[in-house]
Amino acid sequence: MNVEDVMTPRDEVVTVEIPGTRDDVLEYLQDRAFSSVPAVKQTADGEVYRGIISRTALINHPSEDQLAMLAEGVPTTSRGTTLAEVAEQMATTGERRIPVVDGDGLEGIITVTDVVMAIARGEADGSVLVETVTGSAINCIYTEVPLTVAERELSFAGVPYAVVLDDEGGMAGMVTEVDIIAVARVVEGEEDTGESIANQDDEWAWEGIKAVGNRYMPTRNVEIPTGPVREFMTADVVTVSGTRPVQEAAQQMIEHDIEQLPVVSGGDLNGIVQDMDLLEALR
């Protein structure tokens, strides 16, 4: 099976055009719950692919408004590349969406979700078990942590999720980058942080937290609510057993539109399997 068999073709790919502003991308990522969007530029010779704009770039560069400065170069692929080869490319580079190009033209895009869907349909070896691809490290956060702090914690940890723990250390829910971007908003030229950004009187407002608030202000920036994580997390968590085949984990991810699953055994949390982990089944 090749890239062209599972990719989204160009006429179905939503793109943003350069020149443009961050507002267009933020609205797109919030509406679609995607992690990135391709950027193109119209020239006298036609459309030219210019890179990818990710939700991480929006958060890490809150004062940058021009899409040309936010577009990042990422590895590309072609229609004839095998699914196993592109899975290897994603696993090696960590890129979730790989543009399919021909010269300077964008022909489509293949995503981790496309590959996971192929695994869900049975393209991977059915004997590969979830426990063989599960990561042992689990990123966690406390239910009462402000969402602004949770966003920084996810960024520093380099993962798109955190398991939310209650007062007893049990799993109370999950919070993801998608949850955070869904409640973020663009603010323009506000002189103070308002009620939704931590201030020096807040319990969590030590220097690091004030820096989190300041990074979204002033001028045209992204503002994240400071309410506790429990207000924004997903409490009804979908899990999987490590002894189940990766195809079942892939099916769960597709059915529930999620990127990771806690791996449990007898009620105990043993690890996290992310969609990128499932690519190991094709390598």
Image (tube, rainbow, N blue to C red):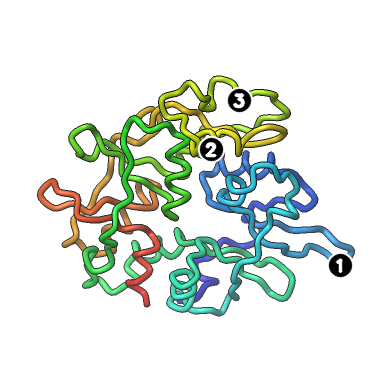
For the residues labelled 3 and 1, say whether their Cβ atoms are less than 8 Å apart.
Answer: no
Q: Earlier in the sequence, mark 2 or mark 3?
A: 3
Left or right for 26, reference 145: right
Q: Quadrant of the N terminus?
A: bottom left
In the depicted structure, whether residue 277 falls above or below residue 269: below
In the depicted structure, whether residue 184 falls above or below residue 28: above
Residue for point 49% across, 66% down? 6
Hey, what amino acid is under mark 3?
Answer: Thr
Which is more toward the observer, 147 or 51?
147
Hey, what amino acid is under mark 2?
Answer: Val
Which is more toward the observer, 177 or 46?
177
Left or right for 45, reference 25: right
Question: What is the number of the mark on residue 45?
Answer: 1
Q: Position of residue 276 (x, y in %)?
A: 40, 63
The residue beneath circle 2 is 212
Which one is closest to the eye, mark 1 or mark 2? 2
User: Which class describes the residues within 10 Å of circle 3: few (<14), some (14-19), or many (20+)?
Assistant: some
Query: In whole angstroms, how far apart are the C-alphas of marks 1 and 2?
Result: 43 Å
Q: Quadrant of the C terminus?
A: bottom left
